Image (cartoon, helix red, strand yellow):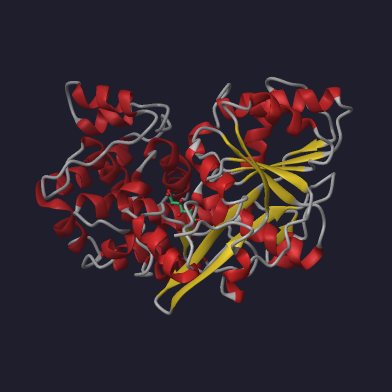
Amino acid sequence: MARLSRAALAALPADARPTIDGDAGVGIVHLGVGAFHRAHQAVYTEDAIAAGGGDWAIAEVAPNSAAVVDALRAQDGLFSVTSLSGAGARTRVIGAVGRVLHAPSERSAVTDLLADPAIRVVTLTVTEKAYQPGSAMVKLLVDGIRARISAGAPPLAVVSCDNLPSNGSQLRALVAEAVPLPTSVTFPRTMVDRIVPASTAETYALVRSALGVDDLAAVEAEPYLQWVIEDDFPGGRPAWDLAGAVLTDDVAPWEQLKLRTLNGVHSTVAYLGALAGYETIAEALLMPGLTDLLRRFIADEIAVSFTPPPGVSVVAYGEEVLERFANPAIRHRTIQVAMDGSQKLPYRVLRTVLDVRARGLSPRFGALVVAAWMRFAEGTADNGEALPLNDPLAAQIRAELAGPGSVVDRLLSLTEIFPAELTGDFRDLVAEWHRDLSTHGVRATVAGAS
Ligand code: CS2
């Protein structure tokens, strides 16, 4: 079967071809070429170029994987995004990628590109764990910004698209530790949203039958997508607003809404679902009692923990999230969402717990999520199958699990994850859930919880 390429485009179904002709110059560097980026920022950028023009093609920089670089280069930067829902599948090819680089083997080309005044925006999807002082991502950005300063510091916006609160401010602080930042470099905050499971053999087969060519960089996603961006782009930006993104001066309530509701509930379903033996998020939602429990978590704890954007109801947003999670066409694996829990729990769940406690209420369901994460970290599902602990703190977590005394106390002592004030009544709540989950299993605990 032929590969997807510029030459193959004419033979594709007309509604699957890119909506731009591929001659826009490169104006964006993106670090982290994962499935989420391809199904999110790349789609918005293609639609923005189609609607508003401009030299905003993307230079993709892969921080690790050479496979995605090889796949995209062999396809002239083209790849497909298939939206999947109960109503069917729609595949479109994205033509917004102008260049592809591999950071480990093409380091100086990446630095030169980051210094190039034609580049006015850098976007990043590098996951929570890359936001550490001195990480490879931070070093790459610092070198790029130094080179840019030597080139006269042309204006640049560096846009974190990872699921962290104040993502732009966190990134700015990490970079500013290593290089004095000129005022011409900004770090707008964003909230990004689209459910994009890892591609599988089925994804590639689906695209082969939809397009009649092979696409080794294909991604699948839910139809829904959202992007809220702080409008602080000193060198200009693509017309993302014309592509449906919301440009605003206050992203904070959107970040909280999404992290605490969507991501918090996602992690809850991931840990409980994986422990109960469900392979996907949508299947896990079929567990008797789980949806009712999640509704109570949303209404009684998440919704009281923060102030949402004006006019938005957290409960209504939560209902929409539960519907999206239930999309049977999306096979998002519970263990994929469960990974990196030490990096995710603090922003997704523990801030909710602290705010619920500060209001004098009991963070009952927040404690259940923590207990479920602990059971997950212990490594065995209720049916006896092994669960993978894929986490940058895996060694520390395993060391605590191997020590003497109660699992709950040992894991709560990991200060990289749990704030010191999460003791006392919270510790007791977690211990109670942990005992229920260990003794009766997830299904019985969930069925008896609401
Ligand atoms: C998920 C997110 O893997 C995870 O931890 O919660 O990737 C989620 O699918 C996205 O944030 C949705 O926008």
Query: Residue at image x 74%, y 21%?
Result: 179
For residue 186, what is the image quadrant?
top right
Q: Nearer the viewer, residue 125 or 407?
A: 125
On screen, residue 209 versus residue 124, left or right, reads: left
On screen, residue 349 versus residue 439, left or right, reads: right
Q: Nearer the viewer, residue 406 or 108?
A: 108
Query: Residue at image x 14%, y 59%?
Result: 444
Name the quarter where the C terminus is drawn.
Answer: bottom left
Query: Residue at image x 64%, y 25%?
Result: 107
- Across and down, in percent, residue 200 comes to 37, 54
For residue 122, what is the image quadrant?
top right
Q: Is residue 46 above or below residue 127?
A: below
Query: Residue at image x 69%, y 33%?
Result: 172
- Across and down, in percent, residue 301 comes to 42, 56
Answer yes or no: is residue 424 visible: yes
Q: Is residue 132 above or below residue 22?
A: above
Answer yes or no: is residue 362 visible: no
Name the quarter where the N terminus is drawn.
Answer: bottom left
